[in-house]
Amino acid sequence: MHKVLIAYISRTGMTEKMANFIAEGVRMAGQEAVVRKVAEISSEKDLEGYAGYIFGCPTYHRDMTNGMKTFLFLAQKANLTGKMGGAFCSYTHSGESGPMVFDTMQHVYKMDMVDLGALNLKEHVIGTQDGTKACQDYGRAVAGKLS
Ligand SMILES: Cc1cc2nc3c(=O)[nH]c(=O)nc-3n(C[C@H](O)[C@H](O)[C@H](O)COP(=O)(O)O)c2cc1C
C-alpha cells in the first residue's frame, strides 16, 4: 500500500472538508491517506515517505495564502520530482490558488501531476453530493496511478 499526503490550509473549514473527502477517495482506491494541516509540517523531513502529494489552499485576495507560499518553499527542499501530485482549492468567485499550487508542483518540483488539473470547487458545492463525489473522484485519480 502506498501513502498519499494531503496537506492543506483552511481558514473557515471549507478546504479542510475537501481534504477529508479527497482522503476518502484515496482510501477507496486502496491506498493510505494521511491528512495534515500545513502548519503541522515544520521540516522537509515531514514530507518523506509518501508516494503521492495533494496540496490544498483556499483563494483569498485572488492569491494563495502566505502560509501556503511558505510551505511551498519548504516543500522545494524535499525531493518530490516524479512523485504523483494534485492540488485543490475552495473559492467563491475567482479561484486562483488551486491552479497556482498545481503549477508550482508541476513546473518547479517536476512532479507527475494528475491529468485533471487542480480540483477547484465553489464553496457552496462542498458537502453536497456532487461536491463530495468530485473530491472522492480526485483522490481516486491520484491514488489510482500508484498501483
Ligand atoms: C477577505 C476574503 C477574500 C476572499 N478573496 C477571494 C478571491 O479573491 N477569490 C475567490 O474565489 N474567493 C475569495 N474568497 C472566498 C474564499 O476563498 C472562500 O470563502 C473559501 O471557501 C474559504 O475557504 P476556507 O474555509 O478553507 O478558508 C475570499 C474570502 C474572504 C473572506
Image (spheres, rainbow, N blue to C red):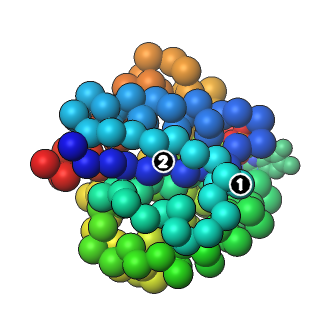
Tell me which amino acid carries mark 1. Ala
The quadrant in which residue 111 appears is bottom left
**Marks 2,1: beta carbons within 8 A:** no
Disc 2 from disc 1: Cα separation: 13 Å
Q: Which percent across, then down, holds residue 35?
A: 52, 41
The N terminus: image quadrant? top left
Give the residue drawn at x 67%, y 52%. Answer: 40
Task: State the residue in front, 128 or 66.
Answer: 66
Seen at 77% across and 35% down, the residue is 12
Residue drawn at x 74%, y 62% as measured from the top left? 67
| Residue of label 2 | 6
Left or right: residue 130 versus residue 36 is left
Q: Secondary structure at mark 1?
A: helix
Image coordinates of residue 145 in percent, x first then y, are 18, 52
Q: Is residue 115 left or right of residue 101?
A: left
Residue 65, given in percent of the width and then of the height, sits at 74, 61
User: What is the crowding at mark 2: few (fewer than 14 residues within 10 Å), some, or many (at least 20)?
Assistant: many
Give the residue type that dot 2 points to: Ile
Label 1: which residue? Answer: 39
Name the spot of residue 34 as percent of width and height, x first.
45, 42
Task: Work out whether 76 lies above or below 10.
Answer: below
16 relative to 104, above or below: above
Q: Quadrant of residue 11?
A: top right
Q: Earlier in the sequence, mark 2 or mark 1?
A: 2
